[in-house]
Amino acid sequence: MPKASQNFVIYNFRSKMKPVTEVYLRQVLKRMLVEIENSRELQVGKNIVFHSLRHTYVSTSRANGEPNFTVQSFVGHKNASTTEIYSHPEVIYFKKAKRFINKIVEKAQKAG
């Protein structure tokens, strides 16, 4: 992201030198779930929570060839076995998920 701090992945839109807050990320996730018409019951049934994003990050990073040590370091796990718990490559259709996530991001960017 141009002119943003290199110390974090997602910057705060009000100040590119500060990271986005967890509260904001939780709000965005709720809006995304509403946008794709996931009812609260479905979210509970499938255990879709903010923490799920951590599992998704680990799984998609590993599936796309990111070295295990890099993924482990980025998520802050001391042990590789912990990172392994977060990885679920057998249940994610990565190409389909990537296309879907890209559509949501593009729509959010257009909405501004």
Image: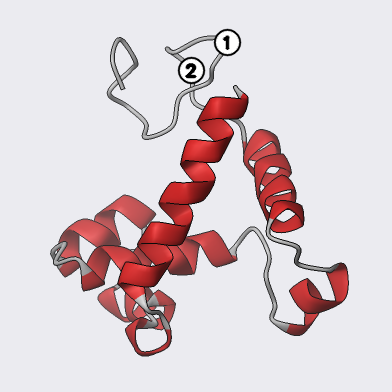
Q: The C terminus is located in which quarter?
A: top right
| 33 vs 36, nearest the viewer | 36
Using the rendered view, name the quadrant where residue 63 is placed: bottom left
Using the rendered view, name the quadrant where residue 5 is placed: top left
Position in image of residue 100 (x %, y %): 46, 59
Residue 64 visible to an observer of this rendering: yes
Position in image of residue 28 (x %, y %): 66, 42
- In the displayed structure, would residue 95 be above or below residue 90? above
- In the displayed structure, would residue 1 be above or below residue 32? above
Q: Which residue lies at the image location 62% right of the left edge and 41% below the top edge?
A: 25
Q: Are marks 2 and 1 in contact (CB under 8 Å)?
A: yes
Position in image of residue 83 (x %, y %): 34, 73
Position in image of residue 67 (x %, y %): 13, 64
Which residue occupies the extreme bottom position in the image?
A: 90
- In the displayed structure, would residue 35 be above or below residue 68? above
Q: Which residue lies at the image location 60% right of the left edge and 62% below the top edge?
A: 51
Q: Few, some or many C-alpha atoms within 10 Å of disc 1 (few <14, some 14-19, many ≥20)?
A: few
Element type where label 2 sits in the image: loop
| 18 vs 95, nearest the viewer | 95
Q: The N terminus is located in which quarter?
A: top left
Disc 2 marks which amino acid? Lys
Left or right of 70? Residue 24 is: right
Q: How is the image coloured?
A: secondary structure
Q: Few, some or many C-alpha atoms within 10 Å of disc 2 (few <14, some 14-19, many ≥20)?
A: some
Q: Which residue lies at the image location 37% right of the left edge and 60% below the top edge?
A: 98
> Mark 2 highlights which residue?
18
Disc 1 marks which amino acid? Arg
Element type where label 1 sits in the image: loop
Q: Which residue lies at the image location 49% right of the left edge and 25% below the top edge?
A: 19
> Mark 1 highlights which residue?
14
Q: CA distance from mark 2 to mark 1?
A: 8 Å
Left or right of 69? Residue 23 is: right
